[in-house]
């Protein structure tokens, strides 16, 4: 996937750490190839359930902590243009639909991306994820078909394979495993327990590769009438 020539990539997710889990390896490959990447993160994830393992954050300190974690993750990946869009965690689904579409449209018109990466609508589980995906799809759909960037979505609902089939792109990221590990480590308030388990597994001599660090999968948005009617 990353071998395709891109002029500009726009990544849109609602929470800090969304990029780390799903796309940090692929983005690191693009960044290493010199492709400009803009990451628009809609919230600071201030309602995240985890406060560190062992806990080191409080409800009051978590927003600032996650803001700094997001910056460190972007740096680990190689993203130079990080946008924090100022929405509130767990309220994205309640934002005015047109306001959301205009936010996405503004980013697209400014950056003119050749590729947009976000969540895939109806298969992203969390209400904030779904609201983000819908807004991106609506903004792109309003564009002239000839001007639309390619739109790739991350999908992980339980019925994804049943409904969507195999991913359109499965990208091997083993060459940038350390970049992804560092991106995930940056979000230590949320991922500490996971990193600890991974390091313990390796320390115990398990040489098998965790699928977190082998590949990343994407579905290309399918502009057909049945699906488009939902938006």
Image (cartoon, rainbow, N blue to C red):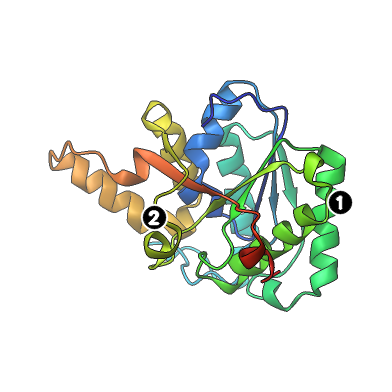
Name which quarter of the figure residue 7 lies in.
Answer: top right
Labelled disc at residue 106: 1
Labelled disc at residue 176: none
Q: Residues within 10 Å of mark 2 (few under 14, many from 20)?
A: many
Q: Position of residue 27 (x, y in %)?
A: 56, 35
Residue at the extreme bottom: 94
Instruction: Name the mark nearer the viewer: 2 or 1.
Output: 1
**Quadrant placement of the C terminus:** bottom right
Residue at the extreme top: 33
Q: Is residue 98 above or below residue 73?
A: below
Q: Position of residue 192 (x, y in %)?
A: 39, 55
Q: Is residue 5 above or below residue 13?
A: above
Residue 132 visible somewhere in the drawing: yes
- Left or right, 202 with respect to 46, comes to left
Q: Is residue 112 above or below residue 59?
A: above
Query: Spatial distance from mark 2 to mark 1, Cα to Cα?
Result: 35 Å
Q: Give the number of marks.
A: 2
- Left or right, 105 with respect to 126, comes to right
Sequence-first tag of 2 and 1: 1
Judging by the rendered image, the residue that carries numbered circle 2 is 192
Q: Are marks 2 and 1 in contact (CB under 8 Å)?
A: no
Name the residue: 62% across, 65% down: 227
For label 1, the SS is: helix
Residue 54 visible somewhere in the drawing: no
Residue at the extreme left: 205
Name the residue: 86% across, 44% down: 109
């Amino acid at each position: 996937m990353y071998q395709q020539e891109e002029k500009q990539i726009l990544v849109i997710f609602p929470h800090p750490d969304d990029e780390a889990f799903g796309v940090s390896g692929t983005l690191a490959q693009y960044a290493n190839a010199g492709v400009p990447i803009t990451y628009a993160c809609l919230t600071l994830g201030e309602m995240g359930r985890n406060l560190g393992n062992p806990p080191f954050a409080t409800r009051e300190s978590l927003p600032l902590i996650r803001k700094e974690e997001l910056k460190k993750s972007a740096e680990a990946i190689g993203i130079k243009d990080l946008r924090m869009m100022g929405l509130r965690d767990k309220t994205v689904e309640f934002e005015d639909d047109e306001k959301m579409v205009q936010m996405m449209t503004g980013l697209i018109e400014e950056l003119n991306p050749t590729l947009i990466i976000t969540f895939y609508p109806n298969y992203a589980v969390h209400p904030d994820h779904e609201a983000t995906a819908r807004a991106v799809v609506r903004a792109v759909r309003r564009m002239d078909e000839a001007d639309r960037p390619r739109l790739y979505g991350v999908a992980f609902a339980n019925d994804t394979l049943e409904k969507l089939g195999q991913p359109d792109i499965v990208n091997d990221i083993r060459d940038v495993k350390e970049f992804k590990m560092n991106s995930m480590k940056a979000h230590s308030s949320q991922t500490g327990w996971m990193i600890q388990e991974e390091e313990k597994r390796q320390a115990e001599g398990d040489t098998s590769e965790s699928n977190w660090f082998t590949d990343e999968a994407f579905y290309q948005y399918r502009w057909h009438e049945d699906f488009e009617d939902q938006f």
